[in-house]
Image: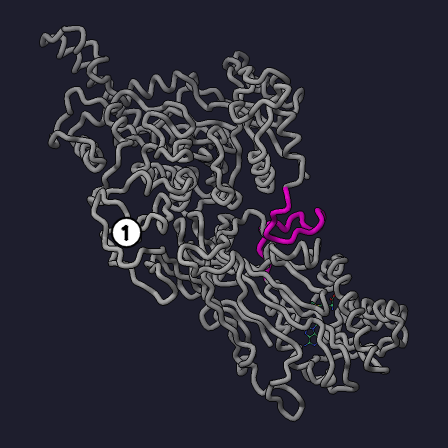
Amino acid sequence: MARLPIAFSPKELPGPPTQPHPAPSPLQQYIGHTVSTTDYDAVCVPLTNRRWMERWERLCLRPIDDEDPYVNGGDHDDDAMDQRNGHAAETDREADIWRREPNLNRDECNITRLEEGQAVIALASDWLELDSFDEGIRFDSELGLRAELQHALYLSLPTLVIPAPSLANRASLPSYARAISNLLQLGGPNAYTQISIRIPVSDPLEIIGQGPAPPNGSASGDSKHHRRMSSLSSRPASMHQHQLSLTQLGQLSQPQSSGPIPGNRVTSVASQASAAPSHASGRTVTHSAIHADPSSTWEMWDCIRSMCGYHPRLTVTLDLTNPLPPSVGALSRWTAEPVKHIWLPATAFIPNAKGYPVLSKACQAFIRGMTKQSPTFILADTDSGRHTSGGQNAYLQYVRHITSQASPNSTISPQGPAEVASGYGDFLQAPLQPLMDDLGSATYDVFERDPVKYRQYEEALYLAVMERAQVADDIVIVVAGAGRGPIVSCALQALDRANVAARVYAVEKNPSAFTTLQERRDLEWGDRVEIVFGDMRTLPVREQADILVSELLGSFGDNELSPECIDGAMRFLKPEGVSIPTSYTAWLAPIASAKLYHDVTQSSRSPGAAETPYVVMMQQVNLLSGDGGGVAGRCGERIQQCWQFEHPRRDLVVDEDGVPYTNSHNTRSATLTFHIPHASPCHGFAGYFEAHLYGNVGLSIHPDTMHRVSPDMFSWFPLFFPLKTPLYLPSGAEVDVNIWRLVDQRSRKVWYEWSAEAYLPAAPNAAPVSPGLKVPHQNINPTSPTMDAPFSPLMPPPHHDQMGDVGRVKIGQTMLHNAAGQHYWVGL
Ligand SMILES: C[S@@+](CC[C@H](N)C(=O)[O-])C[C@H]1O[C@@H](n2cnc3c(N)ncnc32)[C@H](O)[C@@H]1O
């Protein structure tokens, strides 16, 4: 496993440069020394220092009354008031000049030189509040952050880590996200610095079921709320907005006024905010409704990145300060997100029996699972002396040890050996079309490296030969689509093992591969094999076979047109003959993957790129569905079967040449209902196949059976059916997926179309619920932070369907993808 970078977050930094450039600055020396003399790879440094905070606060905040010397000093005379007003006007002027061109001064920055930016992870100021209740603080925080990002872009810093939005202030999250979205425009399309949002892995109070985090505590536990109000808020125009936001939060008992509220402290407003927030619609959402699913921190991230349009320079710094949520499903969502850093403070470690810092089993498993995203770990507070043994280095050594161990077997995609897999992770590949195109030798070379597939074929052939040998003296094997001949060799080895003689034909339509077959016949096989050039669907039959063996399977089973080819080759088969494979099935599951979604929707891709299936070795992908039927027992398993093809089919109507008149019998359709335990956007579907070769031998890339059926096989990666627009699925949602395999004989095409509908389970006869009333069927209310649709007074009463006692309410729908095969089809 590749060595993952680990960064050190020091408590104290060296002072500013004292020598002119190019003499290395103290910070540069410190970073160089740390990286060269320890096992750390980077240093995590706050971009700015206290002086910047003090200037920003002086310009952008006004003292609250009890801090104001003019008010509390008792000097209420006119002169004092005049002096005070004059002073404030001067600061206002200075503030507005700053607002016109927000900047940082040199002595406010910890990092000032290009050379210092190497091996650095920069932290933005954690006292800026993009999501403050106070509109003025929000806007000035955005300007402050703009100045910081501008500086980071100037220094080409790789990342600026932005403080977490406040859990206690979800209502302002859209403001936070809007500000981030605007900041991402800075520097234009060639901007380099990534913005990484620090998101806590959980809200601890949510985990113990006590509702959201308290006010005045940021998600990471730091107190960053300003005790003062914005200087802008004392101006009439913005005060209106400020009042409005407070009223919407139900916090003001006094009537609105157009002027400042005497003695009203921002902190007191914030402290009331954890009481049940009442939305402008008048709909009351209780804490339990909001926080039944431990996902509010992930949901904050989902809101931000959705509002930022899945921007490629927007990433997550996952903060493990708080305890992990107990649900593996809730945690695994992070595997599908662009997690760039993992913040690991000393408090996340527990002491082992000898007092050394270690991580809990759950945390170890989580971290190992996240290593495929290659995050940088940031170790913080390791010098706090929290653990009695090992000293500061123990944390580093331990994380090195954990991240060097392979992640447990929880993959949802076959992975080849490192040299095959490297570079394939989450890479979108166009599915092969071996019927329409002639494959190159290098392509055959790649799939011939998988010994498992051929071992399975040889075993299946051995079983079939042994069985046929019981009833027939004269055995004929036809390898249909022989490629460069590996299955021909499998057939010969199976015959040798069974000690049975047979005539073997190798049929191939790729003229170049046919030359390799000629060479192998001449040099290896001799007259044991007869090679035949041509299309198996039209070639004249020389001799009928006992065993027709083919490998025309795609990642979804039938997507390389195995059904159509084998139908045409049926003419080669004796009435009692067998096909290897005898059947194959296509399977589907809903997935989330910010990376795959971003890749298919990139502007450089064609408009139909999000309506085309891709072959993908899935890594940063989360399988969304759960087992267990869902609330109403309507849902199937987490990965569901779409359809099956069996060979040989004896019921087809064929013409005088033995070729089926139509291909209509190869159309298929499926409607699958999945249960979604944890809220997530759905970015598409993973398609898998299982093939029954013969006897008890098969091939599988189905995540639940591949390790049993064909362990370590890596010839096929899953097929990804993207959604053009993500479909948001709240906790407890049900998603109906429709998928069709369609054929057109005249245009000689086969293609897939797909769409999905999202529902929430709803109680039978559930009347709209009044604010504050308890929801009747608690047990069917699997809520998420954004889920209150089934019982919303704004929605019509739930509609019953035939499938069970629990009705459901539709909440979303996708378009039909690849209608009429306009963007993707496979030629016959
Ligand atoms: C996926 S490759 C498998 C090759 C080889 N059997 C193996 O397993 O390594 C499928 C092969 O079938 C050939 N093929 C596809 N359709 C065919 C057809 N209708 N007639 C003859 N060969 C065909 C392709 O050219 C290709 O060589």
- Locate ligand 1 by image quadrant: bottom right
The secondary structure that most of the magenta stretch takes on is: loop
Residue 584, by quadrant, is: bottom right
As drawn, is 299 to the left or to the right of 650?
A: left
Spot occupied by residue 684 in the image (x, y as percentages of width and height) = 48, 57
Whether residue 567 is visible to the viewer of this picture, yes or no, is yes
**Residue hosting label 1:** 791
Answer above or below: position of 473 versus 519: below
For this orientation, the residue located farthest to the bottom is: 656
Residue 557, by quadrant, is: bottom right
Image point (85%, 71%), residue name: 495
Answer above or below: position of 753 versus 649: above
Image point (38%, 28%), residue name: 218
Q: Amino acid at mark 1?
A: Phe
Magenta span of residues:
408-430
Check disc 1: other Cα within 10 Å, few if <14, some if 14-19, many if 20+. many
As drawn, is 297 to the left or to the right of 454?
A: left
Answer above or below: position of 552 versus 472: above
Spot occupied by residue 55 in the image (x, y as percentages of width and height) = 34, 18
User: Where the N terminus falls, by quadrant?
Assistant: top right
Spot occupied by residue 750 in the image (x, y as percentages of width and height) = 55, 74
User: Where the C terminus falls, by quadrant?
Assistant: bottom right
Say whether residue 420 is magenta: yes
Say whether residue 554 is magenta: no
